[in-house]
């Protein structure tokens, strides 16, 4: 067995124990850092690493790891297919260690998953091009993106993905199903689809492509009302939002609908920047609360373009983390009403730590965040001021009663 490898695993345990000391980023499902990311070096893999701060004596850790190394030796000596892949064993060990903490938001990302997540936050990714809902029993298509492979293949809103490349997805977390659908441009993926009013499941083979995804969409609605949809809080979101607000302002809207439905979060700094566009400067946007009772305060900055225009915010069960930060602050300050359904309830804070040598990343919960009125929404969510559901039938009929009600609420507030 490798002594270096033993040291690496011992240090990884130390990372989990020490991680509360590092700065945090947040998101639902995937956890993202402040822009630029938090870096951490693993001793044994980098000559510049500092391994001078152990969390337990080397004797204690060595004793603790005896069953692991016994298992490691058995696999290498007796497993029938040799040689085994040590990198995969290492990744599996990290994944299992983090899962043992029992925290759904503490986990390991292997290098492929990390690249896919980063590419989506940068405004593009490789996949089929569809908005999806990962929160149900099966991953469900919300809508194909215009001109995407998903649209060309005939996928429709409400389609459920029951298998990927012949593998049954029953009982699998939606985010893991999504991971299997994503993949390099030019490769094929076959989805087994269950569609309402279609008697039998059917297969659809789709060729993946490079999908460029703007994170902000805007338009003018009837009654001189502006509409902005933010799909995620990525690297370009704030600049895209400023551009959208500037274009809408030229058309003199009397009010604004901000759509945060199915927005799973993103960069914390982007949430602060976006919140500053709608809430007056120097207002508390959120607090981070750590296990020792300490708090960090995040406030809005100056230069907001939409701090006074009448505002209504659309939310649903897919609105999480950074989008809940923004929606919660808007609700606390009475800046605008929330319309839709109860949000996801992602009120914890994760630290994102990228591992050296292209070994992926780990994300570890280090704190909870609170709204400006110090509400804790973890596993509770935000309750809208006006609750309106959106059914599968509405989606299939291209109806949006949530948006319709948001416009009504906005018109009432303007009066």
Image: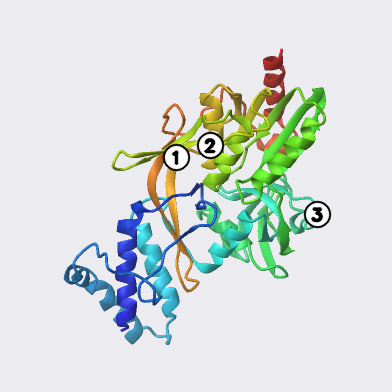
Cα separation between marks 3 and 1: 35 Å
The residue that disc 3 covers is: 147
User: With respect to residue 150, does 345 lie above or below?
Assistant: above
Crowding at dot 3, Cα within 10 Å, few <14 / some 14-19 / many 20+, comes out as few
Q: Which of 51 and 141 is in front in this view?
A: 51
Dot label at residue 329: none
The residue that disc 1 covers is: 347
The residue that disc 2 covers is: 324
Residue 71 visible in the picture: yes
x and y, in percent, of residue 219 in the image: 78, 36
> Which residue occupies 78% across, 33% down?
248
User: With respect to residue 25, does 228 lie above or below?
Assistant: above
Crowding at dot 1, Cα within 10 Å, few <14 / some 14-19 / many 20+, comes out as many
Q: Answer with the quarter of the image where residue 83 lies.
A: bottom left
Cα separation between marks 2 and 1: 8 Å
Quadrant location of the N terminus?
bottom left
Q: Which of marks 2 and 3 is nearer the N terminus?
A: 3
Quadrant location of the C terminus?
top right
Q: Which of marks 2 and 1 is nearer the N terminus?
A: 2
Residue 398 visible in the picture: no
Cα separation between marks 2 and 3: 30 Å
User: With respect to residue 134, does 93 lie above or below?
Assistant: below
x and y, in percent, of residue 243 in the image: 74, 41
């Amino acid at each position: 067995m490798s002594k270096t490898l033993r040291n690496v695993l011992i240090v990884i345990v130390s990372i989990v124990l020490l991680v509360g000391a590092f700065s945090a980023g947040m998101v639902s499902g995937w956890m993202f850092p402040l822009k630029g990311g938090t870096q951490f070096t693993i001793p044994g893999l980098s000559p510049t690493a500092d391994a001078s701060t152990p969390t337990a004596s080397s004797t204690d850790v060595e004793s603790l790891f005896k069953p692991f190394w016994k298992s490691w030796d058995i696999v290498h000596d007796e497993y029938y297919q040799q040689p085994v892949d040590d990198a995969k064993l290492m990744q599996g060990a990290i994944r299992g260690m983090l899962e043992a903490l029992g925290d759904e938001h503490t986990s390991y990302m292997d290098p492929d998953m990390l690249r896919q997540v980063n590419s989506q936050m940068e405004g593009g990714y490789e996949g089929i091009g569809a908005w999806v809902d990962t929160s149900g029993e099966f991953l469900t298509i919300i809508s194909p993106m215009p001109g995407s492979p998903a649209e060309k293949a005939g996928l429709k809103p409400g389609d459920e993905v029951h298998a990927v490349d012949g593998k049954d997805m029953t009982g699998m977390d939606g985010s893991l199903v999504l991971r299997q659908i994503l993949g390099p441009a030019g490769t094929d993926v076959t989805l087994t689809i269950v569609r309402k009013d279609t008697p039998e499941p059917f297969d659809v083979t789709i060729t993946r492509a490079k999908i460029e995804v703007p994170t902000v969409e805007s338009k003018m609605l009837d009654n001189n009302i502006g509409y902005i949809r933010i799909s995620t809080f990525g690297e370009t979101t704030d600049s895209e939002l400023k551009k959208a607000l500037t274009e809408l302002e030229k058309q003199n809207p009397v009010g604004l609908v901000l759509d945060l439905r199915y927005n799973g979060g993103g960069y914390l700094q982007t949430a602060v920047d976006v919140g500053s566009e709608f809430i007056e400067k120097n207002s508390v946007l959120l607090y981070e609360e750590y296990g020792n009772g300490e708090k960090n305060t995040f406030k809005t900055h100056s230069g907001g373009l939409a701090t006074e225009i009448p505002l209504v915010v659309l939310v649903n069960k897919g609105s999480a983390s950074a989008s809940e930060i923004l929606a919660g602050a808007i609700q606390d300050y009475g800046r605008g009403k929330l319309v839709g359904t109860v949000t996801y309830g992602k009120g914890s804070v994760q630290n994102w730590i990228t591992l050296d040598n292209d070994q992926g990343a780990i994300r570890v919960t280090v704190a909870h965040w609170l709204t400006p009125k110090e509400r804790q929404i973890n596993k509770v969510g935000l309750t809208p001021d006006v609750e309106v559901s959106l059914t599968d039938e509405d989606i299939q009929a291209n109806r949006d009663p949530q948006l319709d009600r948001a416009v009504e609420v906005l018109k009432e507030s303007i009066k």
